[in-house]
Amino acid sequence: MEQKGFTVWFTGLSGAGKTTIADAIEPLLRERGITKLEKLDGDVVRTHLSKGLGFSKEDRDTNIRRIGWVAEVLTRNGVCVLASAISPYREIRDEVKAGVGNFVEVYVSCSIEELTRRDVKGLYEKAIKGEIKNFTGVSDPYEAPTNADVVVDSEKEDLAESVAKVMAKLEGLGYVPAAVRG
């Protein structure tokens, strides 16, 4: 059976756990026969595909549109895409979703207080003090999804719970075969 392409789009604030969850899901998908799989991490994309873009609304939109275009092409060619990007603006996420088609939006929720506590680089603290401008969720907006396909709360759930929610949704949509329970 030929693999059906789909994109799992992880959105949420910096440090919420988007990449961590995607990294944990990858081997599970491979175990279930999803062999054509690519990860698009927002930080990695910014150093290659979106090098030179800043953090204005226009540049953020351009960055997300670029990630979305790559996800659309890969999905159309039967690849599973795990995209982890803050993607702060609802309108652009919806635009990407419409273009990709087989799209599962996963909102990784976490409070600013918890993100500040977790932040080893101290970026949230600096942003709260006004030392970093245009910081999403502090001095720049983050528009949480109003109708995400999956909502995980990385503050209250452990990684296994979050992963299980996403995998259950992928199974339910028929993108991933059900796990063999023994």
Image: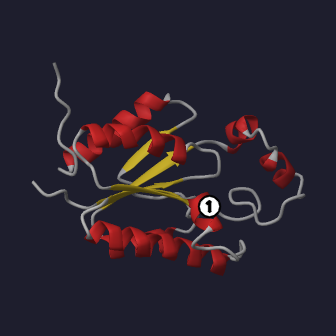
Residue 174 can be seen, yes or no: yes
Q: Residue at x 28, y 45 (%)?
A: 169
Q: Residue at x 42, y 72 (%)?
A: 70
* Residue 152 place in picture, x, y as percent: 46, 41
Q: Nearer the viewer, residue 170 or 72?
A: 72
Q: Nearer the viewer, residue 140 or 33?
A: 33
Q: Residue at x 25, y 61 (%)?
A: 5
Indicate whether 20 appears above or below 148: above
Q: Does residue 36 appear left or right of residue 9 in this picture?
A: left
Give the secondary structure at mark 1. loop
The quadrant holding residue 115 is top right
Residue 97 can be seen, yes or no: no
Q: Residue at x 16, y 28 (%)?
A: 180
* Residue 42 place in picture, x, y as percent: 57, 60
Question: Hey, what amino acid is under mark 1?
Answer: Tyr
Q: Does residue 9 appear left or right of residue 141 in this picture?
A: left
Q: Quadrant of the C terminus?
A: top left
Q: Residue furthest left?
A: 1
* Residue 143 place in picture, x, y as percent: 57, 62
Q: Nearer the viewer, residue 98 or 143?
A: 98
Q: Which residue is mark 1?
A: 142
Q: Does residue 23 appear left or right of residue 174 in this picture?
A: right
Q: Quadrant of the N terminus?
A: bottom left
Q: Residue furthest top?
A: 182
